[in-house]
Image (tube, rainbow, N blue to C red):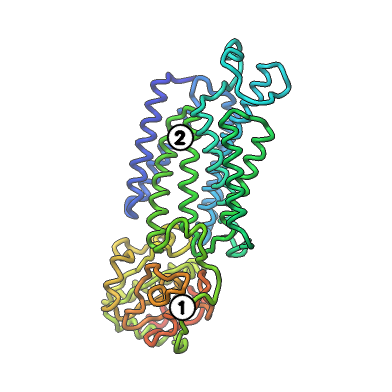
Amino acid sequence: MVWPLTLIDACYFLAALLFILGLKRMSSPRTARVGIVWAGVGMVLAVVATLLLPDMAHRELIIAAVLIGVAAAWWTGRRVAMTAMPQMVALYNGMGGGAAAAIGACELIGHVQDFAVLRGVAAPATYPLTPESWSPLHGMIAIVPLSPVALALGVLGALIGSVSFSGSLIAFAKLQGWLDRRFVFPGQRAVNMLVLAGAVAIGAMLVAGHVTLALIGVFFALALLFGVLMTLPIGGADMPVVISLYNAFTGLAVAFEGYVLHNEAMIIAGMVVGAAGTLLTQLMAKAMNRSIGNVLFGSFGAGAGTATQAIAGSQKPIEAADAAVMMAYAERVVVVPGYGMAVAQAQHKVWEFAQLLIARGVKVKFAIHPVAGRMPGHMNVLLAEAGVPYDLIVDMEDINPEFPVTDVALVIGANDVVNPVAKTDPASPIYGMPILDVADARHVIVVKRGKGTGFAGIENALFYADNARMLYGDGQAAAAQLVSELKTLDG
């Protein structure tokens, strides 16, 4: 059974509308779940409409592949821990880029094979042939020569998709702990630029018509290599920006390949994802007071010892009982979560502790830095999972003016995003990055496993401040201790 093309086009239009409306609703935590459902319905509609195209071949194989992919995604999605969500996002984003690159590869290889059949030879030396040489056999083969514009966009989509695929896999490996945080070598930028220039040059040859299997292979090898080389030197502190950037890359690649396939749904969905990913990347880079180029080619997270200002004082420990008393009798408490809270899976205990404080009449808020965690919105997702009401979660710009009137700031697992040297030490790799002004609170309690540094590899001056106390221990265990001590006071 096939549907009329007008009905299929209508389905594509409705799917595109659902994509846009769904993305709009994802902009707020209150409506994000509904937005995801709307976008998902749009994707299902687009897939079904595509399968019902009159000239669609191998429907059975495509349906089988879709079912396998859905089953695998459902199984992994249900099993993945919230702490591993950044890795999953990076991996799935890489799969999207890889799929776009595979479409480009199939189209290019299809040209070589189809023209070989048309010319009656094993393989053509170069492409293109004149229209007169293939028009008598038009309709007897699955793929016909692409227009110059489609060929150019197909090559560009393949390049971007390949970079996104291999780069996302490296980001996944970094987040998973399989690779060191950074990998650098002398002349790395020059090597990267040479690899990219080689990929672009061969891509230009393909667009010019010199389509051979050998050139296609070298083109994809260089594109994949560039994605690896571009991501290896980037530190873990920049991973939220990198994941967002590769998400934009994937969207652009999908849009370009959608033009090649004459698939309106792919074009619109890719453009929406590409535009949203680009905007998010710019906003996150702005939140770090850095350009995207500096994220990709700078030295953020280069290692310890880059800050020049000496840190006076010492870290002063505090017991859980004293910390609980301090917050129990406070008027305002601001909780600042970070990746350490995610690793310890302490969000539920932290919210339980906050609820006990609220029951005592304490005003509690949660402060979120734009790049806290390992992906955009990581802390928001964790707090939402724990049941924290949205109106208690406050962005950096809104919460910073409140720290001077905050009695206690409870920092759990955050490091670089609360480090005052970002404002005081021009030699620091995080200098200029907007931070949460936790140091302005009357008292600061920092929950931390030990005295190690954050992902930027530098000491945190906040930990040595006169108004700061260190509650050492695992985040979940420390939060559980605070809950226990607070219940003792209430009992």
Density class for disc 2 (Cα within 10 Å; few <14, some 14-19, many ≥20) is many
Of all residues, the one furthest to the right in this rendering is 122
Q: Nearer the viewer, residue 262 or 384?
A: 262
The answer to whether residue 317 is seen in the rendering is no
Secondary structure state at the residue bearing disc 2: helix
Nearer to us of marks 1 and 2 is 1
Q: Nearer the viewer, residue 275 or 429?
A: 429
Kindly identify the amino acid type of the residue bearing the numbered disc 2.
Answer: Met
190 over 468 or under it: above or below: above
Which of the two discs, 1 and 2, labels the residue nearer the N terminus? 2
Q: Is residue 60 left or right of residue 466?
A: right
Q: Which residue is mark 2?
A: 266
Q: Nearer the viewer, residue 122 or 350?
A: 122
Quadrant for the C terminus in the image: bottom left
| Residue at 58 percent of width and 22 percent of height | 143
- Give how far across and how far down residue 105 sits, in percent: 60, 34
Q: Nearer the viewer, residue 31 or 266?
A: 266
Q: Which residue is mark 1?
A: 460
10 over 395 or under it: above or below: above
Count the numbered circles shown. Answer: 2
Disc 1/disc 2 C-alpha distance (Å): 46 Å
Which of the 4 image quarters holds residue 468? bottom left
Kindly identify the amino acid type of the residue bearing the numbered disc 1.
Answer: Asn
Secondary structure state at the residue bearing disc 1: loop
| Residue at 53 percent of width and 73 percent of height | 457
| Residue at 39 percent of width and 71 percent of height | 336
478 over 12 or under it: above or below: below
- Give how far across and how far down residue 29 sits, in percent: 34, 55
Which of the 4 image quarters holds residue 115? top right
